[in-house]
Amino acid sequence: MKNFIILIVIIALFGCVKNVNAQMDFGANVGVVLPFRENKASVSFGYGFSLDYRYFLSEKFAVGAHFGYYPLKTGNSSIIPLNASIEYHPNNNGSSTTYFGFAFGMIQSKFDYGNGTENVYSDFAFSPLIGVKYSINDNFQINTNTHFNLILKPDYVGVIELNIGVIYTLNN
């Protein structure tokens, strides 16, 4: 809970930054997750959705938030990432834009192994990310991205998210 409160405070502080020529992106994605555990426990992939928000501090730098929900194929298991991010968009003026960044926040993981054993974790995670946006017009883009969520827990290594979706851009 403490990590969640810290995350909300950081997102609120990012929202206080003023930019006269502000650009905001709102995205919706579908994707798959591939959890990796150090102890090689039997956990399969999952599929679900994520929502993204970006606020551009300048033409090349953005801060944002990422929320996802991915039910897993193993029992009644799921992965729920909730991250704040900072991204760098080096070529933000073409028909395709590559971006990369770093996200940090909380991952809630529920693993039901089908044999009466269930583990639920809420852990701090950090996530390198990379993506590509393809412009359809001034306001809509197709987005693909990958997050590698590294979870700071001895027996839990991480979760890879592979997403594709659409972005709506709001220009002020």
Image: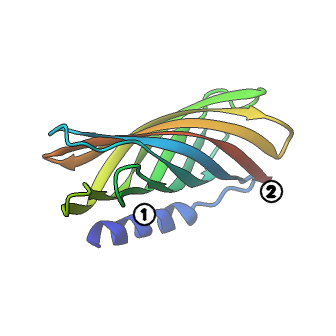
Residue 10 locus on image (x, y percent): 42, 63
| Quarter in which the N terminus is drawn | bottom left
Q: Residues within 10 Å of mark 2 (few under 14, many from 20)?
A: few
Amino acid at dot 1? Ile
Residue 150 locus on image (x, y percent): 30, 42
Q: Quadrant of residue 15?
A: bottom right
Which residue is at 83% across, 36% downward? 136
- The image's colour scheme reads rainbow
Q: Which label is found at residue 10?
A: 1
Which of the marked residues, 2 or 1, is nearer the chain's N terminus?
Answer: 1
Q: Is residue 9 left or right of residue 43?
A: right
Which residue is at 76% across, 40% downward? 141
- Judging depth in this view, the residue of 80 and 112 nearest the camera is 112
Q: Decide: is 112 above or below 73.
A: below
Q: Is residue 17 left or right of residue 23?
A: left
Instruction: Identify the secondary structure beneath mark 1.
Output: helix
Q: Decide: is 165 above or below 99.
A: below
Which residue lies under the disc numbered 2?
172
Residue 47 locus on image (x, y percent): 50, 47
Amino acid at dot 2? Asn
Q: Decide: is 33 above or below 131.
A: below
Residue 130 locus on image (x, y percent): 51, 32
Name the residue furthest right: 137
Distance between the alpha carbons at the discs numbered 2 and 1? 23 Å
- Judging depth in this view, the residue of 6 and 72 nearest the camera is 72
| Residue 149 visible in the shown view | no
Instruction: Identify the secondary structure beneath mark 2.
Output: loop
Q: Decide: is 9 above or below 51.
A: below
